[in-house]
Image (spheres, rainbow, N blue to C red):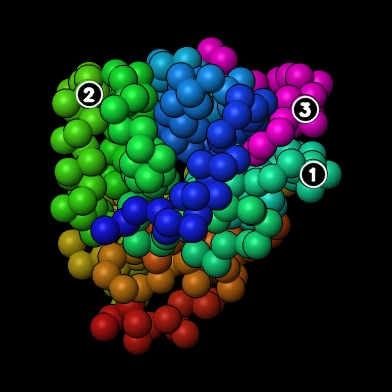
Amino acid sequence: MHLMKNAEADKLKELLNAPKKIAIIPHKNPDGDAMGSTLGLRRFLIKKGHDATVVSPNDYPEFLKWLPDEGTVIKHDLQPEIAAKTIENADLIFTLDFNHFSRCGDLQPLLEKSSAPFIMIDHHQQPNDYAMVTYSDVSICATSQMVYHALEALGGLDMIDKDIATCLYTGIMTDTGSFKFSSTTATTHRVIAHLIEHGANNTQIHEDIYDTSSHNRLKLLGVALNNLVYLNEYNTAYITLAQEELDANGFEKGDTEGFVNYGLSLKGARMAIIFIENKQEGIVKISLRSKGDFSVNELSRKHFHGGGHTNAAGGKSDRSLKDTVAYFISILPQYKKALNA
């Protein structure tokens, strides 16, 4: 069972026993799980009589903008004053799908300054110790599933409506690769079944997230697959996308989502990486995926200022695209044994 511990659930009940002003924060560059969990939780808290607002560090891809109540989200990069005020005035702050303030970009100083109690709901490794209530479980596939268990612990499952169900379903679906990753358990499927019973339209949600490719995105995927390199002796695939290639194909935020998984779909591949040049930020963004017990979380923490999960992590490099790839290839010999195990 993945319920919240009783002590944590009791503390949370106490914090929510009277109407409060609540800020709910996802990580920077929020994905389906970050937005699904925060918007689902927001709607539940509003139904409980609280004044709850999602404050995102920055904007997110178009394919998440159909989510229920998405229009209420305050995006700090577009509305910095309102975002700052919402956090300053909050009696309570939920941080979802991350466990370290450094993961929320320009919101970090605002969160560090706040004296409100924090509630962390997250499934990433090595959580920081900033919250009054910490619900952290790396064995759970998605923060959206943890929000479901939190509602369960609060006795609030009967308050799940179509909108909450839709948000939580979206988060679980996107963070499990449509329920195919090994983190998907029987419990996950029971939760999903319950969300469908409460109005989540699984076929429609899948279409809204995945069947929205623009012509440019598909052309960019063609470029990415054309750039794919397979390193046989390390069972590793990598893809590069240079800034010029992104520009030439009208790149928009979210277009490269899922590209890295094509590398992992190669027969025999144990690890796949995509390197995406970002000239504006002066960095190379990195997404890593693996199969089995090879930990891209550890590799990314050690070499690319990142982290995440055993089989899915992110990172970045301050080197040029060419030098980043050369550095990556130079570290592979130390992982050869593990990648061939």
Q: Which amino acid type is marked by label 3?
A: Asn
Q: Secondary structure at mark 2?
A: loop
Nearer-N-terminus badge (1/2) = 1
Q: Residue placed at 35% from the left, 37% from the top? A: 155
| Mark 2 Cα shell of 10 Å, populated few (<14), some (14-19), many (≥20) | some
Residue under numbered circle 3: 89
Query: Which residue is at the front of the view, 220 or 11?
Result: 11
Which residue is tagged 1? 115
The verdict on residue 88 being magenta is yes
State the CA–CA distance, disc 1 to disc 2: 37 Å
Residue 340: x %, y % from top left: 28, 81
> In what element is the residue under mark 3?
loop
Say if 62 sits above or below 224 in the image. Answer: above
- Quadrant into which the N terminus falls: bottom left
Mark 3: give few (<14), some (14-19) or many (20+) Cα within 10 Å. Answer: few
Residue at left offset 68%, top offset 51%: 101
Residue 6 is one of the magenta-drawn residues: no
Q: Secondary structure at mark 1?
A: loop
Region in magenta: 71-93
Residue 316 lies in quadrant: bottom right
Three-letter code, disc 1: Ser
Residue 246 position (above or below residue 98): above
18 or 283, nearer to the observer = 18
Q: Earlier in the sequence, mark 2 or mark 3?
A: 3
For marks 1 and 3, the one nearer the N-term is 3
Query: Do residues under tags 1 and 2 come within 8 Å of each other at their CB atoms?
Result: no
Judge the density around disc 1: few (<14), some (14-19), many (≥20) Cα neighbours within 10 Å.
few
Q: Which residue is mark 2?
A: 198
Would you place residue 227 above or below residue 154 in this image? below
